Image (spheres, rainbow, N blue to C red):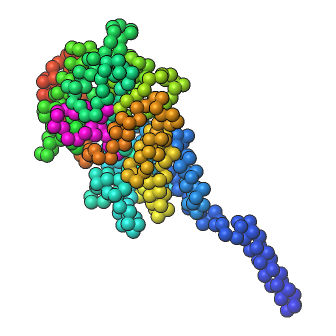
Amino acid sequence: MKKFLTLIAFMLLVSSFVVGCASSSSNGGNEKSDNDVVHLKFWGAVPAESGPQEAVDNWNAANPDIQVEYVRYVNDEAGNTKLETSLLAGGEVDVFVNYRIDKLDKRIKAGMAEPLDQFIEKDSFNIEENFGENSIVKIDGKTHYIPAIILNDFVTINKGFLDEANLEVPTDWTWDEYVEYATTLSQGEGPNKRWGSFVGNLEPKIYEWMDKAVKTELGSNAFFKEDGTSNVDHPVFKKYLDTMVNMERELKVQPPFSEAKATKMQGTDLFLTGKAAMNWSGTAAIRSIKNLEDYPHDFVTAFAPPPKMTEDSKYLGGGTGYLDFVAINSRSKNKEAAWKFVKWYVTEGNEPLISGGRVPAWKKADPNKVAELVLGENPEKLFDVDSFKRVVLNQDIDIVVDTKFDNLAEIQKIVEEQGEKVLIGEQTSDEAITEMKKAIDSALE
């Protein structure tokens, strides 16, 4: 009996040794088992095929112990609600990208975003050196996100039309000078009309572009006074409305707001079909300029900075600002691994997204390589490369960063309603400013 038990023990020992060797052999003796691999879910709104999947694949290939899955959500109200619901559910989201600072602000205050300061300090990761001194708006003294890109605002101009009119590519201009250019560049009547200007890359909006325009003069939080009341009675708000009225109804060098809204005119479409000589737009337009299949054209696009409200306006970036705010879910069970991915993604990792026009906020990115990736092969055929680098890759401009978002949705609605009445001729700009001031102050009480 004793010999039998000894034999059984020996056989079990041999069996465990064989299994152990087989296990070691199956994972190469060095690779981690799946139980040792951290799995992260990374949520963003950019289509996977437009760069995020390639970025994730690059990370996964280099980091077998931390594997990332990209989950796309649509950046609309339904999509943002889905994201927030998932943030509250355990295991659904580890890292997420935000595309509006007011929505991110709400998520931070609701406890959905993990403070990153402990990770930043541990790694001596210098935010100012990597992204700029205004790149982070701290909430309660803490850092909750890092911006991955800079969303550039600029005026695209048909260089052929400029050359015909013997006009230079502007390097610094006011709205008065912009109107002069628009007047000179307008031609024709009726269906063959070439408009000198269109404000906005999509259908016409008032609040969005007014906010960007006045920021060249007022800087951040342009709609708010220090006492918490509305700042819309500052002269630059009225000047912006008067400028639009002048171009649309008096000079007729920009499509009338009512017609543009009713027919859903889009600035990028008008510009790339030669029906608008200038288009105040932004980085997203670059993808369309390169898309010769949908927008066949052979003219060169030049770039100018957004116009200033006055000669003394000092915030030359206008609406240029940080975007793609990357945060870690406070409910993630893998925050250390999530931070490693975030730090990589906001520096070298998001390079595959550059060709889609997402210019990195990382100051150490090679500007020549960024220009090459954004503009594509043989860029001189479609782009004035010098003006692109001067305007879009300018790291010396002051990027305006808002910190106040009180009742923002309601403010936007008030500005749209009252501004539209001005542009369609139902009230004067003075009357609109009076109504805006009254309604916004009431909303802020």
Residue 310, placed above or below residue 332: above
Residue 199 appears left or right of 236: right
Residue 166: image location, x then y, percent: 31, 20
Kindly identify the residue that appears in the image at 53 percent across and 56 percent down.
40
Residue 231 appears left or right of 384: left
- Quadrant where the image shows the C terminus: top left
Residue 372, placed above or below residue 427: below
Kindly identify the residue that appears in the image at 25 percent across and 25 percent down.
178
Residue 159 lies in what quarter of the image? top left
Is 390 or 411 nearer to us in this picture? 390
Q: Specify whether residue 315 is painted magenta.
A: yes
Is 324 or 409 nearer to us in this picture? 324
User: Mainly helix, strand or loop, the magenta region?
Assistant: loop
Residue 24, placed above or below residue 283: below
Is 97 or 369 nearer to us in this picture? 369
- Quadrant where the image shows the N terminus: bottom right
**Number of marks drawn:** 0
Residue 86, placed above or below residue 63: above
Residue 428 lies in what quarter of the image? top left
State the extent of the magenta-drawn residues as a range. 304-322
Residue 94: image location, x then y, percent: 48, 55
Kindly identify the residue that appears in the image at 25 percent across and 39 percent down.
316
Residue 222: image location, x then y, percent: 20, 40
Q: Is residue 200 visible?
A: no
Residue 93 appears left or right of 107: right
Q: Is residue 250 visible?
A: yes
